[in-house]
Amino acid sequence: MQIAIIGASGYTGVELIRLLYTHPKVTIHTLAAHSSAGQPISAIYPHLAHYKLPAMLSIEDMQWDGIELAFCCLPHATSHEVISKIPNHIKVIDLSADFRFSDIALYEQWYGTHTAKELQKEAVYGLPELYADAVKKARLIACPGCYPTSAILPLFPLLKNTLIHSENIIIDSKSGVSGAGRSAKQAMLFAEIDGGFKAYGIASHRHLPEIAFQLSKSGTKPAIEFTPHLVPMNRGILSTIYVKCAPGKTVNDLRAALEAAYKHAPFVHIVPDGHTPSTREVYGTNHCHIGIAASYNAGGAILTSVIDNLTKGSSGQAVQNMNLMYGWEETLGLEGVAVYP
Amino acid sequence: MQIAIIGASGYTGVELIRLLYTHPKVTIHTLAAHSSAGQPISAIYPHLAHYKLPAMLSIEDMQWDGIELAFCCLPHATSHEVISKIPNHIKVIDLSADFRFSDIALYEQWYGTHTAKELQKEAVYGLPELYADAVKKARLIACPGCYPTSAILPLFPLLKNTLIHSENIIIDSKSGVSGAGRSAKQAMLFAEIDGGFKAYGIASHRHLPEIAFQLSKSGTKPAIEFTPHLVPMNRGILSTIYVKCAPGKTVNDLRAALEAAYKHAPFVHIVPDGHTPSTREVYGTNHCHIGIAASYNAGGAILTSVIDNLTKGSSGQAVQNMNLMYGWEETLGLEGVAVYP
Amino acid sequence: MQIAIIGASGYTGVELIRLLYTHPKVTIHTLAAHSSAGQPISAIYPHLAHYKLPAMLSIEDMQWDGIELAFCCLPHATSHEVISKIPNHIKVIDLSADFRFSDIALYEQWYGTHTAKELQKEAVYGLPELYADAVKKARLIACPGCYPTSAILPLFPLLKNTLIHSENIIIDSKSGVSGAGRSAKQAMLFAEIDGGFKAYGIASHRHLPEIAFQLSKSGTKPAIEFTPHLVPMNRGILSTIYVKCAPGKTVNDLRAALEAAYKHAPFVHIVPDGHTPSTREVYGTNHCHIGIAASYNAGGAILTSVIDNLTKGSSGQAVQNMNLMYGWEETLGLEGVAVYP
Amino acid sequence: MQIAIIGASGYTGVELIRLLYTHPKVTIHTLAAHSSAGQPISAIYPHLAHYKLPAMLSIEDMQWDGIELAFCCLPHATSHEVISKIPNHIKVIDLSADFRFSDIALYEQWYGTHTAKELQKEAVYGLPELYADAVKKARLIACPGCYPTSAILPLFPLLKNTLIHSENIIIDSKSGVSGAGRSAKQAMLFAEIDGGFKAYGIASHRHLPEIAFQLSKSGTKPAIEFTPHLVPMNRGILSTIYVKCAPGKTVNDLRAALEAAYKHAPFVHIVPDGHTPSTREVYGTNHCHIGIAASYNAGGAILTSVIDNLTKGSSGQAVQNMNLMYGWEETLGLEGVAVYP
């Protein structure tokens, strides 16, 4: 099956190339990247020099013949325009935020005008652990954000089963810097990042409404705080989540509910009691490891979840969605073991 | 004035050497380090080769003549025994946890038997921003822990002035690895730490009772959660703290209270609204920068405080205490600007 | 085909697990690791928790029934004893230095007494780009050292074809710290390594005689200098090599010879003129990228070669050797694209 | 004494602020920074928020009244124009390459047109260990480049005393990334740099002619190779230098000559035999540590020298020059001990 990657020059693009190049069912037919059009991919990613990959095209020059599926790795708020012009018979997996909000007003409040409102109606939020059935039938998938993936996976089953209070959920997240993308920014220079740690976007990051909106689908109205931080490393997100158990419920109930929810999920693992997961455990993989511990004060729990922001947090999840859409084994092309150390 | 450093071979020891070597009022007379006795300090810290420093002694071989003050950098639970044998006319600044708890039962619950209970009675908790008067008159100072320093400075004035609820205070802290010390541990190898992030000691770290106990001196009974994390960097702590404003109080009230509390504190700075402090800002310095922002949901606030764990978090604070004890300018020897980048 | 990994607890062991777990032709039947015997591999490598892997055994408890091939990841100078006791019908790929020297006297000069001298006679130096034919027929493979791999690949064809002087070859190598292994050493702590760079083992590293001995098989008697350095990163070796062209030869001749030598080598790539390879290009892969440039002064050339020390520098090369030994595609199980960024 | 810093927004500028803020003899009167004019320095360096520093000006708006000395931190090839307009009675220490070449033709070959040729004639190459007398009398100092400082200090005395061959000197240098400056470049992003190592500018870096030209002042005509590399760390340069001893000379002679040459130099230290210096030893200081070892093959030596590229490699050396120009203690303001770890 031939696929296209639109916006191949960024980090989610090159991660897709990594995962799809060895995927047994697909061939990378087209790479589109606006500013690098006409160049081989090795001009911007020298490690790809000896792989057989097409030269990059501008989006305008793309030919759709023979392509069945397009991955779209464009920036938020530009993706919806491009996708609205893709021929209807082609399936699309979008890695931007543009189709994550079935509540268009909410999207527009945080991201600006949406020009493909009709298309939004058919979009499926591509978190396979929650929405596998819809994913299988979708034409357009909106891949979840990286932070949201790390927060929704541990929280959704607990809210859904009313095992925790929906108010005062604290999500304190920490991410490697690849999430900031590849464009040249002073604040992202090695010399600025290395050896330091900071929070950013306190109470104002655009993943906050995404998390809250998605969690509300559990049938509750969660009130969340979300604080992202920047870790001097390349890949990985760890979210530390503080919750209160519902009356009569304990950490053991929460653990049991998570284990039940993800019993058959090939990529979500509840780690044993006493172990605290590190982002290193999921480096370069599509896995999410979730730890749970009792809080110091009675009645609370502290969850820690780790993912690789570029794999389960974006491109790997995109491949997982593709596998489901085409009826393939969910883990196809995603079996690689974490590079360690 | 001649001083001694006991336990000079660890990271708090070498940080004291850095700060005291250029301090205009003191001379390093004695370096004691059990396992390195007989060697020059350059044998374990080559960067000190061309400084005039005494060879290391065993504690047993120390001569107290001429020494006025001893800094004790020994591990928790061994420090109290050594200090109990120091001649009475010598002042002591202890960097361990051994004299931080006026509630001995609480100490013993977390650290084991305390063999110098009488001495505990005269110990002063060396957080100068709160206890400068007692520090000035003390013979024995218990320097605060690194995490506690980062948490108490922003929280104490808010609790004292009942501007925040005392329940459900979440302290999510992140530290560089130098806090783990210099002894060889597999988990602290570069190959294990670099490129990864994790929590540890959830709900069970020994700084939790220290923070809670010290905050209780505000006249409240705070219920805190405390989760430390390990950042792949050498120095720095950032604590992200989630609080609820007391009825009728706002983030502006909290900010005003913090600014008032530290108006004359040379090392504590409330950063401007909209700025989020990075640990890089205080690297190698004795400063604490505190940011404050409104939470997303009404009625809450999110504090971020940064210190250098080895400076304000231990050895620098020790020097600050010394300055006060001897009536010198509080900032003496601590004026250095952060190395950046 | 069932295989065993002896010495599975170190970094070359866990790298073998990563590569072999998804290798289509083999199953990991036995993991032996002295100090961790009886435990699951996840006890020491939590990222492997949800993979189907056998518990670790002591070497003494290993059962050889059904095993066809053993990878031996034990330390130098202990490997030869263990291997001498492995049943004769089992093939062995040794990752230590113990069987790399057909000149036993030279081995003993640098490593100490060798107790399996007879076995040495049948050992093949497992650098497939040079010795594929011998590898295919071998029972016992001695995998090359990591630095030697990075130095021999660019130098051997040039010496063999007498395109460069054999005297005064400078090999200035830089390695990530995973090469130092996983045992707890103070000098390898994150706090000691991060933010710094240094040389070590100047003119005395044990890879020097290995490089010189192997290069001498080109029919020349090269005089080399070799200086290893430690880079604050986990994986990767870059060797910068200074050579003088033979009379009448130019950098273009050298480039042509390298391109010809590795025309059919799936893992060795001569990068285009003007490009300087980074270790990042080969991260986690079995590739070696070689750059070549004219020196500033006439008549010289500067080669730069990069490998991943744990993959092409040890475990990946071991798998490559296995593929050849069993007549499989040389690249089987080694097709993964570098994780980037 | 009032001083000005022109080009204060870059890393050499902020390093000068760090060193001069606590210098007992000077006050920072003016900060000029083109693109940040009108802003406080804390707008671009938040860690300086609570220091008393002037707001940044454009160069055009600078007032020279009361200023005695200007440090110029502008980019190469722009500095000479700005400096040519500074009033004659003001002394100038230039950190760019613009006045390092008394051979203007050589400068123009590597940097382009020089518009202040007359001024060049009075410029002194500010390497105080070699040219202290000239520095003391200079009005205009050209601070050496960072790599050249690390190479010239170990090599000059050896060439001057004809202890080594002048041909085939290999200088293999490795630098932290702060040398690349603070402007936003994709190649300098954390995500691109961390975890990798590479060479750059092979045989073509502009510090090559500077090193060769300065070494030629020893009375020899050295033929050097120079290869810079990028280390994933912020600060520090290590140069590994391969030389051949002159007939009848040994490594001991070389060591003795270096020790003699720098016997009274407060910042240059020959480390003991057997020790290999790390860049960490000189982090944030003005020191240069030099190691020397015999090569493996007879008759050669391997030197390793470490400096902090922003301190001894630029801004610290600038302050050292200032101290000499004004007859102050050479080490004034430069006594700080390295931050470790």
Image (cartoon, coloured by chain):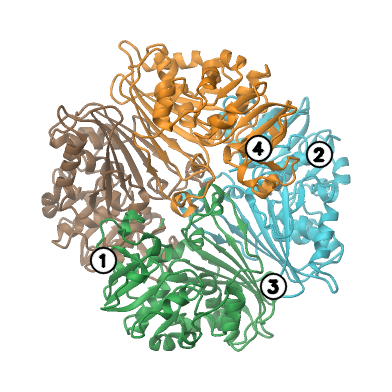
Chain colours: A cyan, B green, C orange, D brown
Does the residue at mark 3 contact the one at mark 4 (Cβ under 8 Å)? no
Would you say residue B69 is visible in this rendering? yes
Q: Is mark 4 on a helix, strand or loop?
A: helix
- Mark 3 lies on a secondary structure that is loop
Name the residue tied to disc 3: A296
The kind of residue on which mark 1 rests is His
- Residue density around tag 3, few if under 14, some if 14–19, many if 20 or more, within 10 Å: some
- Location of mark 1 (residue): D23
Q: Which sits in the foreground, C302 or B193?
A: B193
Q: Tell me the quarter of the picture where residue B30 sits.
A: bottom left
Q: Give a yes or no on whether discs 2 and 3 share a subunit.
A: yes
Front disc: 2 or 3? 3
**How far is disc 1 from disc 4 in space, using C-alphas?**
67 Å
Q: Seen in the image, is B144 located left or right of residue B9?
A: right
How far is mark 3 from mark 4, CA to CA? Answer: 45 Å
Foreground: A165 or B93?
B93
Query: Numbered disc 2: what chain?
Result: A
SS at badge 2:
loop
Disc 4 designates what residue? Answer: C60
Query: Is B77 in front, or is A338?
Result: B77
State the separation of the CA atoms marked 4 and 2.
40 Å
Pointers 4 and 2 within a single chain: no
Q: Mark 2 points at which residue?
A: A330
- At label 2, which amino acid type do we have? Glu
Task: Specify the quadrant that holds the C terminus of chain D.
Answer: bottom left
